[in-house]
Amino acid sequence: MEYPFNDETLLKGNGRTLECLKMRLDPITIDMLRTNDTFASGQYPKLRNVSVRGLELFTEVQSISDYIYTSFVLKMSPSLQVFTDVAMLMGPHKLRFFHGCSNLRILNMPEMTVYMSSLVPLLKSLRQLEKLECKYIVDDLGLSADCVRSTYCPLSDRLRHLSLTRYEEACDDLFQSIVLLALVCPGLMRCHMLHEWRERFNSYVDNAVNDQSLGLYKERLSAIKYLEY
């Protein structure tokens, strides 16, 4: 259902009580919210759960997407804990817009490919994050497992659940990213992936352990439960 009004009628008068918000976005709605400064800083202090959809259909609105995520994320609420159905049109290195959400526990970006170089500072900032969902993770750090672990561990003690939604062919680059994330996030215990990915990932880890590149981390990697979609 599209937003039925041409102003912020549905959001008026509930600034002190609104805790959950689900909206389907389009350029017209975004422009209306911007014009009315609906999400001025501090307007919704109790807002904890936000879901926004529909923006992924409007790939041409690059400047509007910048606005929507800075406003919805940075200004919307200091109490924000759950942000779901995020469609990031701004590019993989704009994850920094989430750095101010210090209370965020769940970040759901099913259509977004995430790069390790952006994910590392994100996890440093979001110390409460427990669950991360994205399309794919790309290892662009170019570092060995030993180097990543000695440099960044522990990156996050709270992250426990990783979910990958890509339905295309997986590759060793993805598996390397999962391994690196597991090594620097000691609490990570659950990883959702396709059945076909799980078989290939297990083979990847077995080969890496046998050739000693991950030999020291066999126990850590075997502790993770790889769940199937």
Image (cartoon, helix red, strand yellow):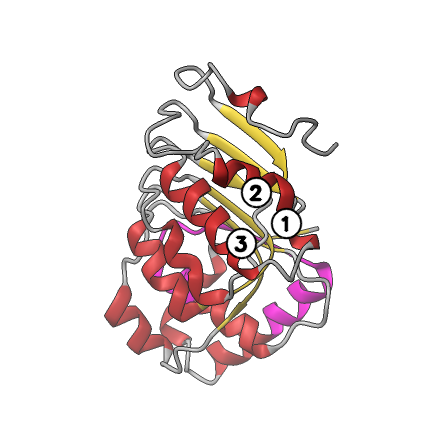
Q: Which residue is mark 1?
A: 55
Do labels 2 and 1 touch, CB within 8 Å?
A: yes
Does the stretch in magenta take in 176?
no
Type of amino acid under label 3: Ser
Q: Is residue 190 above or below residue 216?
A: above
Residue at the left extreme, as displayed: 151
First in sequence, mark 1 or 3: give its number.
1
The number of numbered discs placed on residues in the rendered structure image is: 3
* Residue in front for this viewpoint, 188 or 202: 188
- Kindly report the distance in space between the C-alpha atoms of the residues bearing marks 1 and 3: 8 Å
Cα distance in 3D space between marks 2 and 1: 9 Å
Q: Look at the image and give the residue range highlighted in magenta.
A: 180-203
Q: Badge 1, how many Cα within 10 Å: few under 14, some, many 20+?
A: many
CA neighbours of label 3 inside 10 A, class few (<14), some (14 to 19), many (20+)? many
| Residue 197 in picture, x, y percent from top left | 67, 66
In which quadrant of the rendered view does residue 5 lie?
Answer: top right
- How much space separates mark 3 and mark 2, taking CA atoms? 9 Å
Q: Which residue is mark 2?
A: 30
Q: Mark 3 highlights which residue?
A: 65
